Image (tube, rainbow, N blue to C red):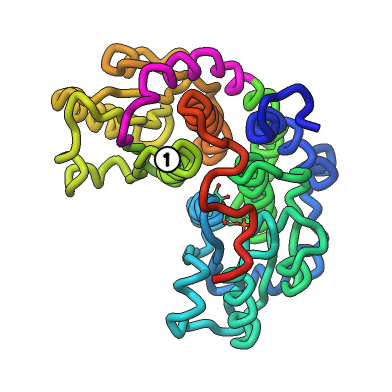
Amino acid sequence: EKGGYDHFMLKEIYEQPRAILDTYRGRLRASQGIIKMAGVDQNIEKFLNANRIIIVACGTSWHAGLVAEYIFEDLARIPVEVEYASEFRYRNPVITDKDIVIAISQSGETADTLAAIKLAKEKGAFVFGVCNVVGSSIARETNAGAYTHAGPEIGVASTKAFTTQITVLTLLALKLAKEKGVFSESRFHEYLAELENIPAKVERALQTNVLVETIAEVYKDSTNCLYLGRGYNFPVALEGALKLKEISYIHAEGYPAAEMKHGPIALIDEHMPVVVIATNRGHYDKVVSNIQEIKSRKGKIIAVVTEGDETVRDLADHVIEVPDTFESLMPLLTTIPLQLLSYHIAVMRGCNVDQPRNLAKSVTVE
Ligand code: F6R
């Protein structure tokens, strides 16, 4: 049932090109120049009149929500707030009937997320679900929604759910950008075309596997690890750190790269591996200076860069290349080597990758 892979997690990492395709196929009608999403089409006025979008989720799904915040604000010009469901539900949030609440959940059973959407509904918000499990509690409680179509995710560490959540939310943002007139026809078409290139580019990002395994060998005995990124790659840094800590039990933290000098830089010495996402679009030069700051403090640098990058290659200890794409689609590619890195480190440490200690696949109690 693991399809020849040693673990479900690895199988699911490798399923991502297909899962992403399954998520947009049938919705993306490039030849007609439209994106079809029934749950959005039926409620389009609500989406177009919304004052803001509030995203509620937990864990990896919350990280997908953070990526979506950048996408919605950047592409569709809609204000977004991203909330941990557990905090949102207990802090007497201001919600009105002009708000759209998007709940993101792979399992569709997360207790805090479910409670958050019940609260939002009581306060009159329109609640939209992005779930993977069909017919799950959250899918049933929401006013409308869109499934991720990732297929069953068995490994406790979420992988293909994350990238397909980002895919669905990108489709939604593009659709709203078009409907609102924020996007020109030609820009919209460029995006549809590039989305269709993503599965093949994810496939190429997966080819870093052999290299990533050799890097894992070097750092498998580390006790700490930092992950840094800016802009669209900041949530990817958070997600990379979460993957490492949950399956390998190495303490890891993700930070926006610029926040380093406000504290975490004190941790850096020759024993500290720092994973930096330094792709060529959006704040590239700033990330390069962050890399220089780490290097001058003897931190070990594992950089995820765009294919052909030369500047970072001269500075970093290890360089992992992913294909180029639009800045807003980059998380779909930069996430891949980080998933593989945590996977290999966990395997080398003898950890139970698919069922890490103390964790459950769906957290149905708060
Ligand atoms: C991380 C992980 C958890 C879940 C979180 C939310 O790999 O699996 O952090 O992302 O428990 O779960 P869902 O998405 O099912 O609501």
| Mark 1, secondary structure of its residue | loop
Taken as a whole, is the magenta stretch helix, strand or loop? helix
**Residue 198 visible from this viewpoint:** no
Q: Residue at the spot x=76%, y=22% of the render?
A: 4
Per the image, the residue denoted by label 1 is 249
Q: Residue at the spot x=23%, y=42% of the render?
A: 260
**Residue 118 visible from this viewpoint:** yes
- Which quadrant would residue 231 be assigned to in this image? top left
Q: Position of residue 11 (x, y in %)?
A: 70, 30
Q: Position of residue 183 (x, y in %)?
A: 61, 50
Q: Amino acid at mark 1?
A: Tyr
Q: Position of residue 85 (x, y in %)?
A: 52, 69
Above or below for 30 versus 202: below
Dot 1: within a 10 Å radius of its alpha carbon, few (fewer than 14), some, or many (20 or more) residues?
some
Q: Quadrant of ligand 1?
A: bottom right
Q: Which residues are magenta?
A: 204-225
Q: Residue at the spot x=42%, y=28% of the render?
A: 279
